[in-house]
Image (cartoon, helix red, strand yellow):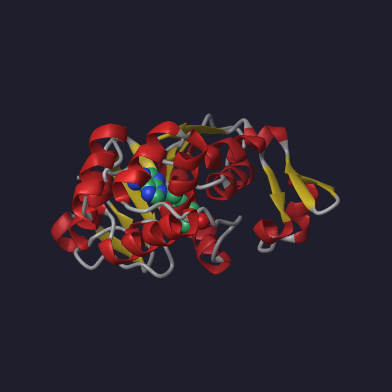
Amino acid sequence: MDFAEFKREVHRRFGLYLDGYKEPQLKRRIDSLISLLQVPDYAAYLRLLSQDSQQWQRFIDKITINVSEFFRNPEIFARLEKEVLPSLLARHRNLKVWSAACADGPEPYSVAILLNELAPAGRHQIDATDIDTSALDAARRGVYPSRAVQAVTPERLERYFRREGDHFYLQEKIKHMVNFRRHDLLKDPFDSGYHLILCRNVVIYFTTATQNELYRRFYQALAPGGVLFIGATESLFQYRELGFMKVAPWFYRRPEV
Ligand SMILES: C[S@@+](CC[C@H](N)C(=O)[O-])C[C@H]1O[C@@H](n2cnc3c(N)ncnc32)[C@H](O)[C@@H]1O
């Protein structure tokens, strides 16, 4: 069985669409896991994945990097706080937000903290999704190492977290503002009517064709006037063709009409 066939079988048996990921790095990651496990070939590895749910989780962990942190790129989050959210809140009392590929939760929780401060009376909906169920379980627990909260201001750390040893426990009120659910960006349908979609630091794993298709679908998922927020190292080169207006380097708006 070659790698192409392995990918087809993973899709057929587990519904995971690996063709959307950039092949060289994907293959490198999977090959290193296979050699670490001392499995002879892709066919044997596929059998192992079918039989052992722990190995399946390890496989998912390997192809998806879960690293995240609160207010990742604080200077860009400052723009979200000072410009983008206020302009959305000027038009909508209640915001509908989606953090797509949220990892273990710092990103949607950062938005929840901002909305709690900017519009505490609003009935906001914050959806947060990821393909990795163990990351989502960690997100629901809301307990983080100091690395994940390094960009949180001392005032917010004091206000929203309880520290126990090396761990920071997020306040229940903020946890309750976010709905986590499993969702595969390459396979599952998108909801619509979002005022803000965050999709940061995940498309780098996908092929250019898959990235463009995703951005096209995000455009459809946004309400008119809604904003797409992408990663600091990413750029939406074809934003005009897709119908977006550039608000700032990492923020793209779907026009009102
Ligand atoms: C580096 S994290 C990004 C977390 C957060 N957005 C941030 O910027 O801090 C990438 C996440 O993408 C998720 N991911 C990878 N492939 C995915 C897919 N096809 N659908 C949904 N999530 C996916 C991974 O599980 C991982 O949690």
Residue 17 position in % (x across, y down): 26, 44
Residue 78 position in % (x across, y down): 55, 62
Question: How many labels sit on residues?
Answer: 0
- Can see residue 184? no
- Can see residue 78? yes
Residue 128 position in % (x across, y down): 47, 39
Name the residue furthest right.
165
Q: Is residue 88 above or below residue 180?
A: below
Q: Nearer the viewer, residue 220 or 254?
A: 220
Residue drawn 68% across and 57% down? 149
Name the residue furthest front.
40
Q: Nearer the viewer, residue 235 or 201?
A: 201
User: Going by the image, does 132 lie left or right of 24?
Assistant: right
Residue 255 position in % (x across, y down): 24, 50
Residue drawn 46% across and 32% down? 181
Residue drawn 62% across and 37% down? 120
Could you tell me which quadrant the C terminus lies in?
Answer: top left
Q: Nearer the viewer, residue 192 or 23?
A: 23
Residue drawn 44% across and 40% down? 56
Q: Nearer the viewer, residue 117 or 219?
A: 219
Q: Is residue 256 above or below residue 153?
A: above
Instruction: Find residue 152 and report its image quarter.
Output: bottom right
